[in-house]
Image (spheres, grey):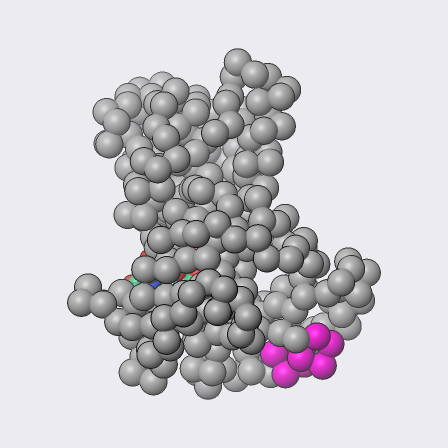
Amino acid sequence: MIVLPAPAKLNLFLYITGRRDDGYHNLQTLFQFLDHGDELGFEPAPDGELSLSPALPGVAPEQNLIIRAARLLQSKTGCTKGARIHLTKRLPMGGGLGGGSSDAATTLVALNRLWQLGLGQEQLARLGRRLGADVPVFVRGRAAFAEGIGDILTPAAPPEPWYLVLHPGINVATAAIFSDPDLPRSSPVLSLEQRLAQPWENDCEALVKKRHPEVAKLLGWLLEYAPSRMTGTGACIFASFDNREAAEKALAAAPADSAGFVAKGCNQSPLFTALRQLKEAAPSSITAS
Ligand SMILES: C[C@@](CO)(OP(=O)(O)O)[C@H](O)COP(=O)(O)OP(=O)(O)OC[C@H]1O[C@@H](n2ccc(N)nc2=O)[C@H](O)[C@@H]1O
Ligand SMILES: Nc1ncnc2c1ncn2[C@@H]1O[C@H](COP(=O)(O)OP(=O)(O)O)[C@@H](O)[C@H]1O
């Protein structure tokens, strides 16, 4: 069995620069990975069989991005091999941490190798884009400044601090935020250098705080410790710290109705770190790109 991580991401900043004819929005956002996330195990199975265990509560297997990624790979390549996939789910769903997208990306990368399909990263990222706007950055595995709908990527190397990530115990539906008339949609298009030099903000934050007072309350609490923001369309918020101990200390004091974790920011995805380690351990069974 191949076991690989599906790390979380943070949107260190997120600006909405316009609405497109297809209903999607153009963004300027900075993605960074965390050394915390889901974990997936992959075993070969015969006759194109695909199974996922355990099932995710509230998500039918055929709707799960893991099965959808595997089916997309089968149908695009005509591959008749199958897989049994085991999921250890740690990331909250609808938390703005990209868990579903990361699961899909890890599935594409892992099955490309398990089934020896030989697709390149570019092809996998293009397939991933059909599953979700956030999938390509996880397939590429490098911290990035993203434009377009989040899929036009320029590698970036922001500082890699320790983060405290807190979840207020509610889920935010990405589509509901993007369809709200009150969402600001007219941030200017700036260069990466200009964006990095300005204060880092999230255009979705004020609206999510208004719709979900739980997010506003928790953010108010965290701001007492360190500069804090929301990731993606929420519901999770994060603050950066110089060291792990300071982040752990804030976590220990967090309100009882929140949940959270401490993790390190990573400009290289833990998925690719794990693939390299696997390659070093057994060069013939798996290759990292
Ligand atoms: C905005 C972000 C920032 O990371 O939010 P989070 O989901 O992580 O919170 C993501 O790009 C989300 O990516 P992902 O979750 O893959 O989005 P998708 O499944 O493709 O789209 C969900 C819905 O969000 C809206 N959407 C998404 C991305 C985008 N650039 N413009 C949009 O308008 C669309 O209404 C779409 O129906
Ligand atoms: N493997 C998966 N993990 C998480 N969510 C999934 C998965 N497959 C499908 N979904 C659906 O995608 C939605 C968004 O999930 P997720 O990526 O965790 O949130 P976000 O985009 O806010 O970070 C979930 O609410 C769920 O309905």
Above or below residue 41? Residue 235 is: below
Above or below residue 61? Residue 28 is: below
The residue located at (37%, 66%) in the rendering is 27
Percent coordinates x, y for residue 215 in the rendering? 55, 78
The answer to whether residue 232 is visible is no
- The answer to whether residue 70 is left or right of residue 85 is left
- Name of the residue lying farthest toward the left: 21
The residue located at (49%, 64%) in the rendering is 193
Q: In which quarter of the image is the N terminus?
A: top right
Whether the magenta-drawn stretch holds residue 70 is answered as: no
Above or below residue 79? Residue 123 is: below
Percent coordinates x, y for residue 183 in the rendering? 35, 80
Which quarter of the figure has residue 12?
bottom right
Percent coordinates x, y for residue 178 in the rendering? 33, 72
Q: Which residues are drawn in magenta?
A: 219-226
The residue located at (40%, 69%) in the rendering is 190
Q: Which of 56 and 266 is in front in this view?
A: 266
- Name of the residue lying farthest toward the top: 284
Total marks shown come to 0
- The answer to whether residue 187 is left or right of residue 76 is right
Which quarter of the figure has residue 173?
bottom left
Percent coordinates x, y for residue 119 in the rendering? 34, 28
The residue located at (26%, 71%) in the rendering is 19
Q: Nearer the viewer, residue 262 or 173?
A: 262
- The answer to whether residue 191 is left or right of residue 163 is left
The answer to whether residue 158 is visible is yes
